[in-house]
Amino acid sequence: MSSCPAKRFLVFFATLIFISSLLITGVGSIVSYAKDECKDIEGTSERTECYEKKEEDVQRKLNETQDKLSGVQNTIGNLSSDLSVATQQIIQTQASINEVRSELEAINETLNDLKGKLEDKINFRNKLVRNYSKKSALSDFELFLTSPDTQITTDGELANLTGFQYSIFVYAFNKATNEETIKIITSLNSEIRGYEEDKKQAEDIKNDLETAEASLVALKIDLDAKKAQAEKEASELAEKREGYEEELSDLQSKISALKYGSENGTVGDYEAPGAKTPDPPFKPAFAAFSYGAYTHYNGMSQYGAKGRADEGKSYKDIIKFYYKEDVSDKSDFPDEICVEGYGDMDFQEYLYGLAEMPSTWDEEALKAQAIAGRSYAYRRTRGGGCICTTQSCQVFSKSKSDNPPAAWKSAVDATENKIIGGSLDAPGYGWYSSTTGGYINNVGWDTNGKWPNDAYEKKAGSPWFRKSWYTKSYNDGNTCDHPHPWLGEEEMADIVNAYYVWTKGSSDEKVHVTPLTKDCWGGDPYSIEKMREKASKYGGGFNKVTSIKSSNITNGQTVTVTVQVDGVSRDLDGQIFKSVFNYRAPSYVAIRSRLFDFEKED
């Protein structure tokens, strides 16, 4: 019985040593990100480059933070695994301890019972030893003198034995008695020694179990503490990662605004020349075409106003259509306006310097522009302050103000003190932009029949009414080594795959949805193969697009894009597709408006 607990303890102690080897230390670090220093840069190209560099830097920091977070998460995983093992071992060991304790209690009960019995046996052994040590055999002379009547049989009667016979009898008896006594004494000594050994081993096992149990509890406490520390570090890194992701998202939005036409834009003093879409250098090929560009979709379309004026509409008709209000004469209109960089200026002279519409256009369009410009400036400065001189407000040229073209000066003078009626706080009051694509918020379709062929902007010849974009901006011809808007079947499938990663993937995966042309974008884009692999987890993973179209256009927006890809048809959210297209398409290939469609060349 004494050897079984000892074996269990050896196994248990070996397990304890194994668990102790599982301790792991986590590491982590905290990073920070900078404020926006690009917003005050005046030039669009310079501001774009600033944001591009900042995006690349933030993305690098995000990747570094993610790597550190992954390392800490691995540490947590290992600690959790170790802690799980330790907990299971503690449970198993506790069960073994309880089992051994039960056995020890049984052993101790047995030992205590033996202790009582051994006391009698020890007394008996001691008595035997004393008697044995005192007893001696009779001499020959004593045997010769022994009388037969002193020899008693086992039944109490005398035996008629001679001295010699009695001597033989006594010898045999003593020999047997001595051997049995020695056996008894030896047995008692062995039993007593075994008891003492068992008692000591039981006490040793009990002490070892208590030590081992305390060590396991200390191990679990240590693992708990290390895991808690690693989780704290992971939480801090995750918070930093979220901050970088928010900053990256903000930078992506700003870059999108600068590169893909979300900034407000007007015609300016001179019309932009039209440009033919380049022929595709390969076939089959796909290109995305945007309706309108550089617009906020509010108020008056300048090319729409031109188209209406060309068809004989008056400036009052034009104002009425775009603002849903009549022209109003304001008798108390202010004489002066504060202009940034020039101070107070005569209001009419300020309007002479507006560089927002070519002076060669029809006079009714020019009058509508003068009223819109006056109304906007009045609304902007009615609470005090000065109006800026860039597209953030209205473009102002002091040289033009000093020497205004005759047609423009005539339009301003003819509409003096005239503004748009209604509330100055109405949506889009005084706003205008070059080309909306044929649909305006709070107005509807800007057509004289069916869109798109009967759209006034198309009739007026806007170069941005329907255009496929592949240059950096409307006034910057940089193409970043992609001098056409065409994409192949695999490239278009790659954008579809990016759509699935963007809409269903993790934030860690989304940051890799950037153009493969890193020379003009930077970043860390997935390869086509990697994007396909990632998308396959989310319902994508396509190889080739065979057709694509805008299947649902509602309220001036492409609502649904339908693609035929790898023999199946998929309907995608149009506005999300536009965003993903702009983030993934190579170089400066882009969709610049919320209303778009596609062409295929076979």
Image (cartoon, rainbow, N blue to C red):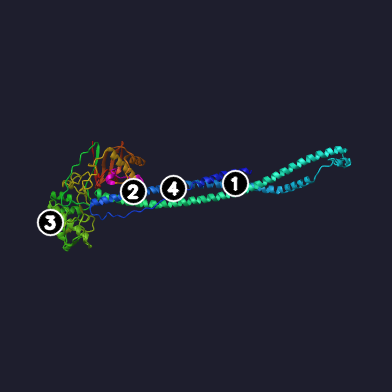
Give whichever of discs 4 and 2 has the lower sequence position.
2
Q: Secondary structure at mark 3?
A: loop
On residue 100, the disc is: 1
On residue 75, the disc is: 4
Q: Position of residue 23 (x, y in %)?
A: 48, 48
Q: Position of residue 304 (x, y in %)?
A: 17, 49
Residue 540 in view in this figure:
no
Closer to viewer: mark 4 or mark 1: 4
In the displayed image of the protein, which residue is found farthest to the left?
406
Q: Quadrant of the C terminus?
A: top left
Q: Which residue is mark 3?
A: 404
Q: Secondary structure at mark 1?
A: helix
Q: Amino acid at mark 2?
A: Arg
Residue under the image location 74 percent in, 41 percent down? 183
Residue under the image location 83 percent in, 37 percent down? 168
Between the C-alphas of marks 4 and 1, the distance is 36 Å
Residue under the image location 84 percent in, 39 percent down? 167
Is 196 displayed left or right of 589 in the figure? right
Q: Position of residue 279 (x, y in %)?
A: 20, 39
